[in-house]
């Protein structure tokens, strides 16, 4: 593709060289550059792509996008831009032939609930015949294609190339989780969002965002800058205080609430062990809800998904059928079968608010005891560790603190942060024998996650509920030495099988 055609679609400050250069590929990593590629010198938190321009040129780059002038030789065209992150999204959109043009596109943002809502909207769109692709935390998928993703929202080069392929293979709509990092770093600037959904905002990623106001502003970009112009495209959960704040800043909003009349709200709501039933009022008419999802926070997720369906102009019967056909979401209150007459659930909850919501939900099931295995990730916001721990200790019969993804941090140091939250509820840690033989409420700390899960399974009695939280669908654990295979669901099944011998 000629550089001239790409530049017709993008803003730049200065062109130094020929706009007739042939661009054969796009790269942000100098190590991946091949002859004829365009290289983007992105300045990151620890690495500045401008330091690698010479390597990219030596590898064959014909064009470099830069934010400051760098000498490259007469054979290389330089494009001076204000922000290489913005430029790469714009160029990828043009290079891959604007893959989401003309599609119904739903972007879902917020701290919790994004994955569940995308699964719900995917099911609704499938029922309407619109052949959706999905980009999210668990994977990127369309039809029989299911690709792993490194981030909730991938980088724009991978994203646009993948969506281009999905479009060629027959995709005709898109549902995607939109992370605050992606919005802040302009990864999704080339997507034609038609509907934006806001779930909630609770403390998360504050190691990156610094404070909740910056976190909120990053999320708000979807609604203030990236949505197409038109009414009824903003679906906002006003049961959340930040949702109410966002709704006040946005005109013509579809509000959602489980607690009070709104654009989308439950006229009738019944929560039980079998799921959620109810009747939802919407501007398009009432939607009957029969869902296998559990708990009040999933009622909020259902309202957001219904709102997206209404914003897309879908009939209430189609929305209702799409909800009913979704059997569940991987790693979101996912049940593990057992012969202990107990309930065993795996969930992705990895923030204080998410863990609190999950535990309050399982309390509604009326178990004899609640045993909670949880951990906190390393190289992430340390402030949420005692918050998660306090929620686990306060809402569980026994909280079992362990490792999650420690990454480069010392697991014991992470657990010391966790212990401070546990001690807010229980001043003394139980011994393993006390936890095994007694009925006292309390906590134990078992750093090895496999051992923690096996210990918890060994405690199970009839009518107990065991929640293993934090990793959900993940099938790996990230240690200082690297990534290893680890799946909570597999470990639970192995522990259950070992107990049968």
Image: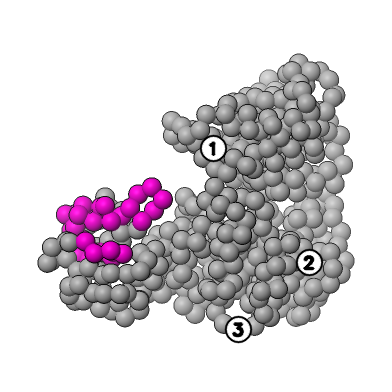
- Residue 336 appears anywhere in the view: no
Disc ID at residue 378: 1
x and y percent of residue 368 in the render? Answer: 86, 34
x and y percent of residue 474 in the render? Answer: 56, 43
Sequence-wise, which precedes: disc 1 or disc 3? Answer: 3
* Residue beneath the point at 73% across and 62% down: 241
* Residue beneath the point at 52% across and 29% down: 410
User: Label 2: which residue?
Assistant: 257
Sequence-wise, which precedes: disc 2 or disc 1? Answer: 2
Residue 131, above or below 277? below
Q: Distance between the residues labelled 3 and 2?
A: 22 Å
Residue 14, above or below 386? below
- Where disc 1 sits, the SS reads loop
Residue 387, above or below 111? above
Q: Is 347 covered by the magenta stretch?
A: no
Sequence-wise, which precedes: disc 3 or disc 2? Answer: 3
The residue lying furthest to the left in this view is 74
Image quarter of the C terminus? top right
x and y percent of residue 268 in the render? Answer: 87, 66
Q: Distance between the residues labelled 1 and 3?
A: 42 Å
Q: In this view, does 206 lie to the left or right of 201?
A: left
- Where disc 3 sits, the SS reads loop
Instruction: Look at the image and give the residue range highlighted in magenta.
Output: 43-70
- In the image, 405 versus 45, the foreground residue is 45
How many numbered marks, from 0 up? 3
């Amino acid at each position: 593709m000629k550089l001239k055609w790409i530049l017709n679609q993008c803003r730049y400050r200065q062109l130094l060289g020929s706009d007739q250069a042939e661009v054969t590929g796009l790269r942000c990593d100098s190590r991946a550059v091949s002859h004829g590629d365009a290289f983007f010198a992105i300045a990151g938190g620890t690495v500045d792509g401008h330091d690698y321009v010479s390597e990219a040129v030596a590898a064959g780059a014909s064009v470099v996008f830069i934010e400051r002038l760098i000498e490259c030789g007469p054979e290389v065209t330089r494009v001076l831009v204000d922000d290489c992150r913005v430029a790469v999204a714009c160029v990828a959109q043009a290079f891959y032939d604007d893959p989401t043009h003309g599609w119904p596109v739903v972007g879902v943002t917020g701290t919790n609930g994004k994955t569940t809502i995308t699964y719900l909207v995917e099911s609704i769109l499938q029922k309407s015949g619109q052949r959706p692709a999905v980009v999210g935390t668990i994977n990127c998928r369309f039809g029989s294609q299911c690709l792993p993703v490194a981030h909730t929202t991938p980088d724009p080069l991978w994203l646009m190339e993948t969506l281009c392929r999905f479009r060629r293979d027959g995709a005709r709509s898109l549902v995607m989780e939109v992370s605050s990092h992606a919005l802040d770093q302009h990864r999704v600037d080339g997507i034609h969002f038609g509907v934006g959904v806001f779930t909630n905002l609770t403390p998360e990623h504050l190691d990156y965002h610094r404070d909740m106001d910056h976190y909120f502003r990053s999320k708000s970009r979807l609604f203030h800058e990236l949505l197409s112009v038109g009414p009824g495209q903003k679906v906002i959960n006003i049961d959340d205080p930040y949702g109410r704040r966002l709704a006040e800043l946005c005109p013509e909003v579809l509000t959602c609430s489980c607690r009070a009349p709104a654009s989308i709200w439950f006229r009738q709501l019944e929560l039980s062990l079998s799921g959620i039933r109810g009747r939802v009022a919407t501007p398009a008419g009432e939607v009957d809800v029969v869902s296998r999802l559990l708990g009040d926070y999933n009622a909020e997720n259902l309202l957001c998904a219904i709102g997206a369906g209404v914003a897309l102009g879908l009939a209430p019967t189609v929305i209702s059928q799409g909800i009913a056909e979704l059997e569940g979401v991987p790693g979101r209150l996912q049940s593990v079968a057992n012969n202990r007459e107990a309930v065993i659930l795996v969930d992705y909850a990895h923030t204080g608010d998410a863990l609190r919501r999950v535990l309050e939900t399982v309390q509604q099931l009326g178990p004899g005891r609640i045993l909670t295995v949880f951990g906190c990730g390393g190289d992430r916001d340390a402030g949420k560790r005692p918050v998660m721990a306090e929620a686990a200790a306060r809402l569980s019969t026994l909280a079992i603190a362990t490792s999650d993804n420690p990454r480069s941090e010392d697991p014991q140091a992470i657990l010391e942060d966790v212990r401070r939250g546990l001690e807010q509820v229980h001043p003394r840690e139980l011994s393993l024998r006390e936890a095994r033989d007694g009925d006292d409420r309390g906590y134990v700390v078992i750093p090895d996650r496999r051992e923690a899960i096996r210990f918890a399974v060994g405690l199970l009695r009839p009518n107990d509920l065991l929640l293993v939280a934090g990793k959900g669908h993940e099938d790996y654990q990230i240690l200082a030495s690297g990534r290893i295979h680890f799946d909570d669901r597999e470990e639970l099944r192995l522990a259950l099988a070992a107990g049968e011998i």
